[in-house]
Amino acid sequence: CGTDNYSFTLVSNNISHDKYCVYNCITYIINKLKQQLPSLEEILFFSDDAASRFKQRYLIRNLTRMPYEYQLILSWHFFATRHAKGVVDGIGDSVKRLAWQQILTKKDKCENATDFVNIAKRKTKAIIIEEITQNDIDKSTTQLQEFFSNTSSVKFPN
């Protein structure tokens, strides 16, 4: 019973960070891990306290479906709010710093997510860096609209 750790930076020109974009990121990570580890049984996700992206009813609803879809045990762990000082932020910040240092040399231009991914991949092999395209997000929007339309919010008593 061993553990492997993987860090991901997923880049997109889409800046909405909505439920469809988040779904694509999670799906990409699960598929990549299943490729790397065919006997994978469990994934522990760690993320920061980004309530608008990760602590919302659509993600929670999707997480109730995904274990059946992927035949995996999935759990989600939230770090307390760290105001961009946590481990999760550090991974993305490291990738941004490496790309920015390369861009400052004027050897590379970065005009979009594809350029950023290409630069960043040349600068580090320790982090899995990929692009989530608008086309990917649009496909999942069509696929998930009905599923999400039946998602109710949870009301807590005062």
Image (tube, rainbow, N blue to C red):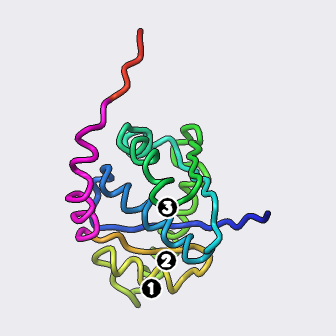
Say left or right for 35 vs 116.
Answer: right
The picture places residue 19, in percent across and down from the top left corner, at: 32, 49
Q: Main secondary structure of the magenta part?
A: helix
Please state which amino acid type lies under the numbered disc 2.
Answer: Gln
Say left or right for 150 vs 105.
Answer: left
How many C-alpha atoms fall within 10 Å of the one at disc 1: few (<14), some, or many (≥20)? few
Please state which amino acid type lies under the numbered disc 1.
Answer: Thr
Q: What residue does disc 3 label? A: 70
Nearest to the observer: residue 60 or residue 11: 60
Tag nearer the camera, 1 or 3: 3
Specify the quadrant that holds the C terminus.
top left
Please state which amino acid type lies under the numbered disc 3.
Answer: Tyr
Q: CA distance from mark 1 to mark 3?
A: 43 Å
Q: What residue is rendered at 60% in x and 49% in y?
A: 86
Picture layout, residue 4 above or below residue 50: below
Picture layout, residue 14 above or below residue 112: above
Query: Which segment did they paint magenta?
Result: 134-152
Q: Which mark is residue 101?
A: 2
Tag nearer the camera, 2 or 3: 3
Q: What residue does disc 1 label? A: 105
How many C-alpha atoms fall within 10 Å of the one at disc 2: few (<14), some, or many (≥20)? few
| Tags 2 and 3 touching, CB below 8 Å | no
The picture places residue 113, in percent across and down from the top left corner, at: 33, 74
Q: What residue is rendered at 67% in x and 65% in y?
A: 5
The picture places residue 133, in percent across and down from the top left corner, at: 29, 71
Whichever of callouts 1 and 3 sits on the residue coming sooner in the sequence is 3
The picture places residue 100, in percent across and down from the top left corner, at: 45, 74
Q: What residue is rendered at 48% in x and 70% in y?
A: 31
| Tags 2 and 1 touching, CB below 8 Å | yes
Reply yes or no: does residue 57 show up in magenta: no
Q: CA distance from mark 2 to mark 1?
A: 7 Å
Element under disc 2: helix
